[in-house]
Image (spheres, rainbow, N blue to C red):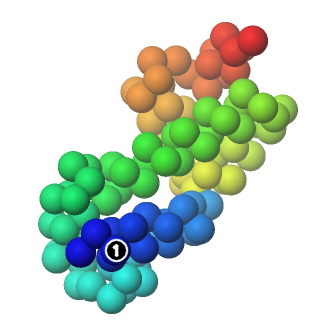
Amino acid sequence: VVDRVLAAEAWAVGHINEVITIGEWARAVGLNADYFSRLFKRETGKRPMEWLNERRLQMAAQLLSNTRHSVGQVSEACGFANAFYLSRMFKRHFGLAPQHYRRARP
């Protein structure tokens, strides 16, 4: 069970810049979507998409801190549908809009 969850995490990180559906993610590790979602939550404490969005937001924060990429470029690199969605999720998670986060970093 743990091996499947670790494989699922590794697969998702390898496809982080792509649109990922639960069905596709579950198939990648040989499980049905409902069982995968329950198993993932049981083992990680987070729903699969919640876990994935956290990884994407961490990656976005790194890119904003270490590059001069636009918010649009960062959103594309991190697999968000668009810059608006990234900005909304980023502000909810970090308490700052991406542009303000970038300016606040040393």
Expressed as whole percent of the image width and height from the top left, the position of residue 15 reads: 57, 68
Q: Amino acid at mark 1?
A: Asp
- Locate residue 15 relative to residue 67 in the image: left or right: left
Q: Is residue 27 above or below residue 52?
A: below
- Please indicate, yes or no, whether residue 34 appears anywhere in the rendered image: yes
* Residue situated furthest right in the rendering: 68
Percent position of residue 35, x then y: 16, 76
Look at 43% across and 48% down and name the residue there.
Answer: 53
In the rendered image, the quadrant that contains the C terminus is top right
**Is 84 placed left or right of 52 in the picture?**
right
Q: Which residue is mark 1?
A: 3
Q: Quadrant of residue 39?
A: bottom left
Neighbour class for label 1 at 10 Å: few (<14), some, many (≥20)?
few
- Whether 69 is drawn above or below 98: the answer is below
Q: Is residue 50 above or below residue 3?
A: above
Mark 1 element type = helix
Q: Nearest the camera: 100 or 42? A: 42
